Amino acid sequence: MHNLYNLSGKKVFITGGTGGIGSAVVKNLLIREEAEVFFTSSSQEKIDKLIGDLPSNAKVYGAICDMNDVNQINDAIKLAIEKMNQIDVLICNAGTNADKLFLRMTNDDWEKVINVNLTGNFLLTSGVAKEMVKKKSGKIIFISSIIASIGNQGQVNYSASKAGLEGMMRSLSIELARYSINVNAIAPGFIETEMTNRIPDIIKDMMRKKIPSGAFGGTNDVYEMIGFLASEGAKYITGQTLHVNGGMYLN
């Protein structure tokens, strides 16, 4: 198997590893790149299914982790280090949404999304970054969203959480650069996943008309950017939000 990004043997921690984008990342890292992967999910059934779909010799570990629970986050970090000895690449992919028009949005709707998408990633990154600082190397990749840049009706909480994530990324990249740690974000546009497949066809057709390429992206399109940022080929790239959206938003 051709190793495109030279990630063989790299120890990768990814949250949300059983979702559409997450599972594609896990599979590519293990099968194509021959990396070692620790992933989290909110479902043991999904963890078992993903591991069952992978080669028996894959160096992969899965664990339940609620990104709204600081104790579970800290336990996941400890377990990842116990299994892999270190973490070379952190991919903050897990996220949630609670879409509702602003005038109907409750405090619970707001806090649920901010706590998982922003605070949870702060807590996770804080624990992992301390380990990376010790060895003076590492790659941290946040999965943001095109919605952080363009906004969307009914997603005030979600867009705020992702915009906050990008702001955290920029400041963190400045602080960690002296330790040879790169910190970047990827902002996918509309990607073909189980979630987007549930959108009514009439709405999907309207969305496609806003995309210059005329099509939704695939999960592998997002992976290719992740693989690049995780590699030494991106060692001079930090503090950036890189968009994968078919031209829907131009920065």
Image (cartoon, helix red, strand yellow):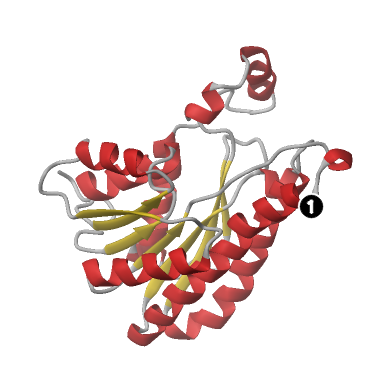
Residue most extreme to the top: 202
Residue 251 visible in rendering: no
Residue most extreme to the left: 57
Residue at point 18% right, 55% down?
59
Residue most extreme to the right: 103
Residue 48 position by quadrant: top left
Above-or-below relation of 174 to 159? below
Residue 50 visible in rendering: yes
| Residue 197 percent location from the top left of the image | 52, 22
Above-or-below relation of 198 to 15? above
For label 1, the residue is: 107
Look at the image and tell me in which quarter the N terminus lies: top left
| Residue 210 percent location from the top left of the image | 69, 27
Q: Is residue 12 left or right of residue 235?
A: left
> Amino acid type of disc 1?
Asn
Of 98 and 191, the residue lying toward us: 98
What kind of element bears circle 1?
helix
| Residue 56 percent location from the top left of the image | 11, 44
